[in-house]
Image: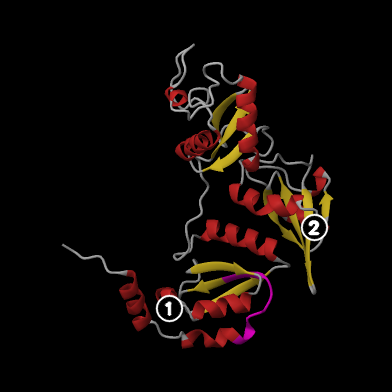
Amino acid sequence: MVRRQSAPRLTLEAAAIYEYPEHLRPFLSALPAVPGVYLFHSESDTLPLYIGKSVNIRSRVLSHLRTTDEAAMLRQSKRISWICTAGEIGALLLEARLIKEQQPLFNKRLRRNRQLCALQLTDQTVQVVYARDIDFSHAPNLFGLFANRRAALQTLQSIADEQQLCYGLLGLEPLSRGRACFRSALKRCAGACCGKESPQAHHSRLLEALERVRVICWPWNNAIALQETRADMTQYHIINNWFWLGAVATLDEATTLARMPAGFDHDGYKILCRPVLSGKYDIIELNPESIPASS
C-alpha cells in the first residue's frame, strides 16, 4: 500500500529542491511596475509555460521567483516577456484570451464550454437552457451561469431548501395533481403544491432569490468602447454582446480587430459586466460601421 504524503512533508520536499532562478535575473531589471500580462517561456518559442496578470507586473513576477511551490515551472523557464495594459480590466481580458489560445502547461485550462447553461423563468416555469441554443447576451430572465445541467439543478435545489420552495413545482421531482409533496409534510415546503401558498407568491419568492444571479442582457444596440487610462497609456476596449474584441489606442483602429465569433463569452461576461455597468468608466457607443461584423 502506498502511503499518501502529508502536506507538511510535501512542502519541505518542494523547498528542498527549490533554488532561486538565477538564470532569470537578466530579465528582472526591465520588468515594469504597471498593469499587464506576463509570460514565462521555456526553450520553445511557441507555447509559454505560464501566463499571469497583475496590476503590477514587476511585483507579481518577483513573487513567483520566491515561491517554492513553483520550483518546477521556474526550473523550466528560460525567459520572461510581458505586455503592458492601461489597467486591470485590460490585464484580465488579455490573460483570459491568451490562456485560451495558447493553453500554457502550468495554467488551469480555459476552454469554450459547450455545456454552459442557465436557469430561465418563463410563465412561472423554470427550465435549464443552453448557450449553444439561445443567445445569452439578449435572452431575458436568465439566472446563473453554470458549467453543466447538474450544477444548475443543484443551485435550484439549494434555493428551494433555503426558501421552502416546492421541488415539484420547480420540476425537481414528480408531483401528483391535488396532492401535497413529501417535503410539505416535513415543513420544508411552504405548501404551494397544496394551496397553502399561491403559485404567484411561490414564483415571486423564487424570483427574489434568483435575482442576485440574474444574467444581464447586453444594454446597447451596438458595440461600445470602454476607455481605460493610466498616467502614460490609454486603451479603448471594444466590446459587443459582452465579447471583448480587443483593445486599441484610438477608436479609428476598431475596424482592424478580428470578427466577433458566434456564441456567448462566459469569461468576457464575468470580467466586463460589473465595470461596464458601474459608471466608473467612460463608455462610447459605436456606429455599426466602425466594428467588424460577427463571423
| 87 and 207: which is toward the camera | 207
Q: Is residue 71 visible?
A: yes
> Farthest residue in the top direction?
178
Display colour scheme: secondary structure
The answer to if 42 sits in the magenta stretch is: no
Q: Is residue 29 above or below residue 112?
A: below
Q: Marks 1 and 2, Cα distance to the nearest angstrom?
A: 39 Å
> Residues in magenta?
29-38
Identity of the amino acid at label 2?
Answer: Lys
Q: Secondary structure at mark 1?
A: helix
Q: Position of residue 21 (x, y in %)?
A: 46, 84
| 235 and 141: which is toward the camera | 141
Name the disc covering residue 68, or none: 1
Q: Is residue 39 left or right of residue 276?
A: left
Q: Earlier in the sequence, mark 1 or mark 2?
A: 1
Name the disc covering residue 280, or none: 2
> Farthest residue in the left direction?
1
Q: Is residue 108 above or below residue 122?
A: below
Identity of the amino acid at label 1?
Answer: Thr
Q: Residue at x 34, y 79 (%)?
A: 12
The answer to if 36 sits in the magenta stretch is: yes
Q: Is residue 247 left or right of residue 49?
A: right
